[in-house]
Image (cartoon, coloured by chain):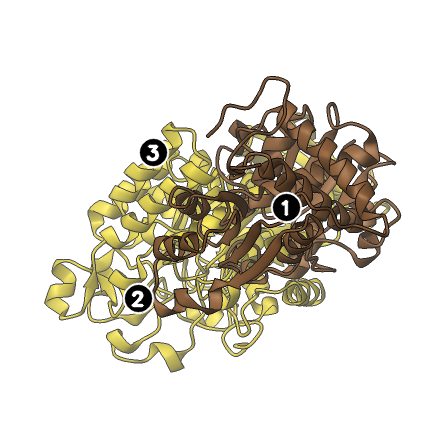
Chain colours: A brown, B yellow
Amino acid sequence: MTIPLANGSFVRRHLLTCEELSAGEINALLDLADKAADGNRQIIKKRDVLRGRTLINLFFEASTRTQSSFELAGKRLGADVMNMNVSTSSVSKGETLIDTAMTLNAMRPDILVVRHHAAGAVELLAQKVDCCVINAGDGAHQHPTQALLDALTIRRAKGRIAGLTVAICGDIMHSRVARSNINVLNTMGARVRIVAPSTLLPPEAHRLGAEPFTDMMKGLDDVDIVMMLRLQKERMQGSYVPSTREYFHFFGLDHEKLARAKPDALIMHPGPMNRGVEIASTIADHSRSVIRDQVEMGVAVRMAVLEAMARQLPNH
Amino acid sequence: MRKNGSNPNEQATAFLNARLVDPASGKDEPGGLLVKGGVIADLGGHLRRNAPEGAKVVDGKGHVLCPGLVDMQVFTGEPGQEHRETLKTASHAAAAGGVTTIVVMPDTEPVIDQVALVDFIQRRARDNAVVNVHVMAAVTRGLKGQDMTELGLLQRAGAIAFTNGKTSVGNTRVMRNVLLYAKDFGALIAHHTEDPHLTDGTVMNAGEVATRLGLPGVHKAAETIVLERDVRLVEITGGRYHAATLSCAESLAVIRAAKARKLPVTCGVSVNHLTLNENDIAAYRTFFRLKPPLRSEDDRTAMVRGLAAGDIDVIVSSHDPQDTDVKRHPFAEAADGAIGLETLLAAALRLYHNREIGLMPLLRAMTINPARLLGLPSGRLEKGAPADLILVDLGQPWVVDKAQLKARSKNSPFDESKMQGRVLTTMVAGNTVYQYAGGERS
């Protein structure tokens, strides 16, 4: 892995985790993404930064928005984009992850965007291929572009990230979004809280730089950002949480709980939302909700990451 | 749910010439006590002889006046098995035994595992019961030990604690998550401790008696194994844990170690395990078939010592009404359980009369300790506390006669037993709900 420059341009071959990203690198990516966001609002959205390059979306786990977001980002930069949903193909035929990687490597792609259900799988794959690898989510480990798009959304709405208090609420235990966000937000100087029932709080989370709360009312006191996470249905039937009804009562974002946050607090959600489970329907459509902005910034951030990586590619 | 106190404008009641015994403060002194508006308005030596004007006077005749008992493990048949016991009959049995607060278990049909059912019990108790009735709700759905119930919402609805009834949660992961989740609400988990696999198919304690009788016995390690596991889980989760009814010396060692490590662990014992042992089963007497089973005499004496030492926090009756349809069977095919509300105090007083334990530690385990554990305002003699009181003649001899018991089922292991110590008056929230009429054998 390349050593990032002190002035903060992003010079890495892969984007696998947010743990090591410096504030300079993050700012450089967000600056690029800002420009991409502006470009995406023009009639002609297409550029040729990745002309002639091949981007493969390799998704071992079903995804709609992340995959389409990467696909669009690649196409807007002029790359040839191929989507592979491996959940339905060779894996079911027994091929190992490394064999799949070697096979794809032989097709000589320039950038691989990978999502896998196992933590660490994307990094393992990155060790075996010659191209750039972007982690689009590995188990409960990391989802770097999500944290970057969240940071961009916050920066554009609030003008800064440093000094803000962000409450990440919900299934922290199983969330790669939470882990990446804790890393990025801490690096950028925000204060991070995590709010969940004890059954969904990972042990020693405070060591990652997040203050845990099991009482959501207290956890939302005076925060600038309320970031809700999705709770998977199978985790709300008695194993971690007794029921959706109880979860919504104590940990769903409703007007009463939101009132504890600052009056201008933003509401975020990485999607897809379970209305009435982790977020009241009227809150999702609230004027302070930036949930749709997050989707827009998703494309911009992914373009920025691809563009930064294109600069590292041979023969650039 | 507490019974409502009487109207504050109603006539006050003054107990004069009583021996005030308050396990909360440790005070044991002659005096009097004034009840007004459902609460203790005043108490002390200055009320020993003189009642305020207009108060109804009760002469204590030097007998013990102490807080009514709090029994945190009572099974009833309501809903679903009303022929065994209803909240109403259980409450009358309680009143006659000096028990002013009962905590009913969720082992009913249906199981009390939903908010609406907690509400049902509370409404039925409000309308029919003469003592305070609180609900201990199921901690897993249907008491099956798999899926957690809505602990937060159940607690808001009035569930005072949570339990898996007469069974242990066998799945360690479920138990871990339950303790972890309950911690967020400060909820108490009162757990039955018997390894379900070791216990399966057994009917009594393993040992010489079981071997002679040819009955399948369970080793007491079945209890200690679950208890040790649970203590480890408390250590990693911080959840409040109460071992509901322990029965052997080894378990007390585990409790002592846990308490020494300042873990939020408490434990209880049924009065049966303090006063009976496996030899009482004698010729296959099914009223002595209990859960956990009666153990050896060494274990019984260890339990009494543990109580005196404060290792054991709570004594319960473990009142479990079973009809003849399930008790009149060969021992191995009969149901577990014995009634105990009306004999709880008298049976416990055996230990006092035998000089096995002092009166104060004995009463503490049936009043202030369970009250504190459950966050109840009762169980103490102090100004402003609920007037849940009993007047007890410690010396009065009597013989238990099942025909006179108020419980609907008559499966008492103390039937025909000689007792010493009788409840004369039971008061709940300032209302007299039981008055001893005499007339039984002595």
Q: State the residue in front, A279 or B333.
A: A279
Q: Is residue A229 above or below residue B115?
A: above
Within-10-Å neighbours for mark 3: few <14, some 14–19, many 20+: some
The residue singled out by tag 2 in the image is: B289
Distance from the alpha carbon under mark 1 to that under mark 3: 70 Å
Place of residue A5 in the rendered image (x, y in percent of width and height, measured from the top left): 57, 20
State the residue at coordinates (56%, 46%).
Answer: A175
Place of residue A49 in the rendered image (x, y in percent of width and height, measured from the top left): 67, 43
Q: State the residue in front, B11 or A238.
A: A238
Mark 2: which amino acid?
Answer: Arg
Q: Is residue B10 above or below residue B40?
A: below
Mark 2 and mark 3 in contact? Answer it, CB < 8 Å. no
Disc ID at residue B256: 3
State the residue at coordinates (13%, 71%).
Answer: B214
Distance from the alpha carbon under mark 2 to that under mark 3: 28 Å
Mark 1 and mark 2 in contact? Answer it, CB < 8 Å. no
The residue singled out by tag 1 in the image is: A50
Secondary structure of the residue carrying numbered label 2: loop
Residue B314 image-quadrant placement: top left
Q: Nearer the viewer, mark 1 or mark 2?
A: 1
Mark 1: which amino acid?
Answer: Leu
Q: State the residue in front, B120 or A277.
A: A277
Subunit that carries the residue with mark 1: A
Secondary structure of the residue carrying numbered label 3: helix
